[in-house]
Image: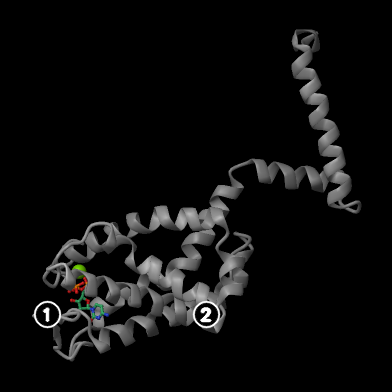
Amino acid sequence: MAVAAVSPATSRLAIGGIILANIASAILSPSLSSGRLRTALTQHASGMDIVGVLAVAFWAMLPAYVPNNAAVLVGGGPPIDGGRTWNGRRLLGDGKTWLGTAGGIVAGAALALGLNTIHSTVSDAVAGLPEFTLVAAITLPAGALLGDIGASFLKRRTGRERGAAFPGLDQLDFVVGSLGLTVVLAPGWFFETFTLPVLAVVLVITPVLHVGTNLVAYMLSLKSEPW
Ligand code: CTP
Ligand code: MG
């Protein structure tokens, strides 16, 4: 019989596991039928979690991903720094305009509110997607552009001309700005949405998506540099 081939240590482990699972099920919910508990446990153990975490990360960050691209499309006109310089270099440069910033925030917030309207439909397929509060709908894109503006400031201070690459900063400035502003102004929503696994996924997929979309914008001649 197969059981005979199992070492005593393994069977002790298995028995221990069964006992633990029983205790856990008793604690978790006495009303939960064993069938439902089994489904819950299998879903937890399968790839469901990873897909769910990816979906939440992407969904929650979409309003922070679009503003930079929207700014490229609508940007132009008077620069935010009004042409002012500091130590002979522009404060920000002509690449940061009022129009681009406003357009980016409006685009990101509109997207967040748009996602809210399809939330209940999409939730049937993917559980755990957040709805955006009005504050989060604004802080996500506004923070993304603030991060981008902060990066511009640092680029000028380090002698980089408009459009020059700053590897690392270019890919993460807006995610830091977006999450930073949101954690300060919408902490409740932030901690409910950005669990540690979600945050980890955001930090990994953001640079990848950023490089990819900028490359596409460059190939479509929307941007003058591929970063
Ligand atoms: N843009 C804008 N306002 C912003 C951000 C971007 O108008 N707040 C527009 C500008 O036309 C800008 C383009 O989007 O040239 C690309 O954005 P980005 O790469 O962030 O700016 P750069 O031109 O590279 O300038 P910098 O070196 O200062 O980042
Ligand atoms: Mg640039």
The label on residue 87 is 1
| CA separation in Å, label 1 and label 2 | 33 Å
> Foreground residue, 33 or 207?
207
Q: Which residue sits at x=23%, y=57%?
A: 167
Task: Report whether the residue tagged 2 is closer than 8 Å to ligand 1.
Answer: no
Q: Which residue sits at x=79%, y=18%?
A: 11
Quick check: 105 above or below 175?
A: below
> Can you name the residue that lies furthest to the left here?
88
Quick check: 30 above or below 180?
A: above
Asked whether residue 26 is in view, the answer is yes
N-terminal of the pair, mark 1 or mark 2, is 1
Counting from the top left corner in percent of width and height, residue 138 is at: 46, 82
Q: Is residue 70 left or right of residue 33?
A: left
The label on residue 185 is 2
Quick check: 10 above or below 138?
A: above
> Can you name the residue that lies furthest to the front here?
87
> Foreground residue, 205 or 212?
205
Q: Is residue 8 left or right of residue 71?
A: right
* Image quadrant where residue 98 sits: bottom left
Q: Is residue 134 left or right of residue 32?
A: left
Q: Quadrant of the N terminus?
A: top right
Task: Inspect the image, locate mark 2, and give the three-letter code of the amino acid beneath it.
Answer: Leu
Task: Report whether the residue tagged 1 is closer than 8 Å to ligand 1.
Answer: no
Q: Secondary structure at mark 2?
A: helix
Mark 2 Cα within 10 Å, few/some/many (few <14, many 20+)? some
Q: Quadrant of the C terminus?
A: bottom left
Q: Which residue sits at x=83%, y=31%?
A: 18
Q: Which residue sits at x=33%, y=54%?
A: 208
Q: Is residue 202 left or right of residue 149?
A: right
- Between circles 1 and 2, the one closer to the viewer is 1
Counting from the top left corner in percent of width and height, residue 65 is at: 38, 69
Task: Inspect the image, locate mark 1, and give the three-letter code of the amino acid beneath it.
Answer: Asn
